[in-house]
Amino acid sequence: MDVTVGKSSPLQSVASYGSPEFLALLLHDGKADINGPGGDGNTCLTSAVMNKNAAMVDAILAVEGINPNAAGPSGWPPIVGAVKSANFAMVEMLLASGAVEINNGDGAGWTALHHAANNGNPDILKTLIAKGADLAATTKDGLTAADLAKRQKQKACLAALQEASGVPVTADEPAESASTRSAAGGGPGRHSGRPAKRGRTTK
Amino acid sequence: MPIAKLLLDSGFAKNFHPFKIANRDIREAVLDYIVSHPKDFDLNEALEEAIKSCPELRPTEAEQISIAERLIKAGASIESVPKTIVVNGGSLHKTHTFGPLFYLGRNLYEASGFFKALFDHGVKLKPTDVFYFLRLNDVSRLERFLNNVKLDVNAPIAYSLQPQPLLHYACASCINFETLEYLIVKVGADPCIVHGGETPLSILLGLLEWSSEDDKTSIFASAKLLL
């Protein structure tokens, strides 16, 4: 039985709404790929994180062979999923595991820091910075987290980014990064913050 | 009888049907009147309404059998008949097949007595009626159906807009462990079959989102069976 088949695969459903007993049942024969993407492109860890199922996040992180950074081609890395769902506790849980690549991006190159800045989550953003998030990382459109914070008028996030980088960005400065302006000769269009290609999203 | 006559003359019982009257004695009196005046009533509709009342009134199985027997004896049809219905405020007319089995399909959890009566009267069954029997969560009746109707349980069966294999439907409908076990072990339903990008297991576990703790216990048992 392939437990990764399904619009929401068995692994994803269990990760989102089940309990560790269900996970043990699905993994009992050792054949299931714990890091494989489900129907919406997300791994079961991302599904658990985005549905705030702390017991399952714990259980999945304890599975042998788990890659806490795995993401399908159209999915989000778990840390990005946690930030997108604005769940501080999940961000902390993932970071506490010690193996999270904090600067991994989604299909559009958006890292957790980009999403935190874009969505206006200063607490999460500060935690990410404290854990070494790359302030200069750019999306595929060439935007830094500060560019996004400014564009979305996320003042608290922008201030935190300015403080961390020591490079003030004035309120009347264009949102685009210097590198984008010089390379493209103009500003990129707005970005949805979603990976380039998506299936059904996990709730 | 005077009460029944009064209710019927006032239009109450006729329009709202005796099976929506909570008082059993009055309900019986109206039913007595209907079956003794079969030409004045649409008995098919009366039978349908009796079935439809089950979730609200919860008549006992014995009472259901009694109502069905009396209406059928008076002339109610047990077969499904095409009916044209008006939808979208009259902009669309659609012909659907209605009849006792159709309504049983919607109220099966409460209407096992009606089901039994129809079955005993030899209602003509089609392969697609398997869904009604499946939802009874009663292995013996499902077995009785499958012994009478030829059916490939692993082929998609046209029940709704999206035909699907029986086990997929069963897993989407919270069918109990015993019925799933019967389908897999005795009937040969394949738990690994992929249809529409889904396995029976993916459908079953998709129910977790809306499940109570009790439901989760039975989903766990069924999942174990499917694996």
Image: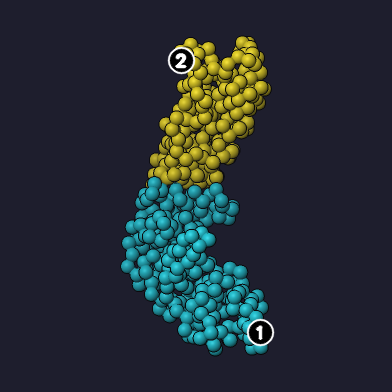
Near-viewer residue (A47 or B158): B158
**Does residue B5 sit above or below A142 in this rendering?**
below
Secondary structure under tag 1 reads: helix
Discs 1, 2: same chain: no
According to the colouring, which chain is cyan? B
Near-viewer residue (B75 or B167): B75
Question: Residue B85: image x %, image y %?
Answer: 47, 66
Question: Residue B186: image x %, image y %?
Answer: 37, 63
Residue A184 numbered mark, or none? 2
Seen at 47% across and 40% down, the residue is A200
**Does residue B28 sit above or below A115 in this rendering?**
below
What colour scheme does the image use? by chain
Seen at 53% across and 82% down, the residue is B41
What type is the residue that disc 1 sits on?
Leu
Q: Which residue is mark 1?
A: B6
Seen at 37% across and 50% down, the residue is B195
Instruction: Residue A120: name its quadrant.
Output: top right
Question: Residue B168: image x %, image y %?
Answer: 42, 55
Packing grade of label 2 (10 A; few <14, some 14-19, many >=20) is few
Seen at 33% across and 65% down, the residue is B151
CA separation in Å, label 1 and label 2: 86 Å
According to the colouring, which chain is yellow? A
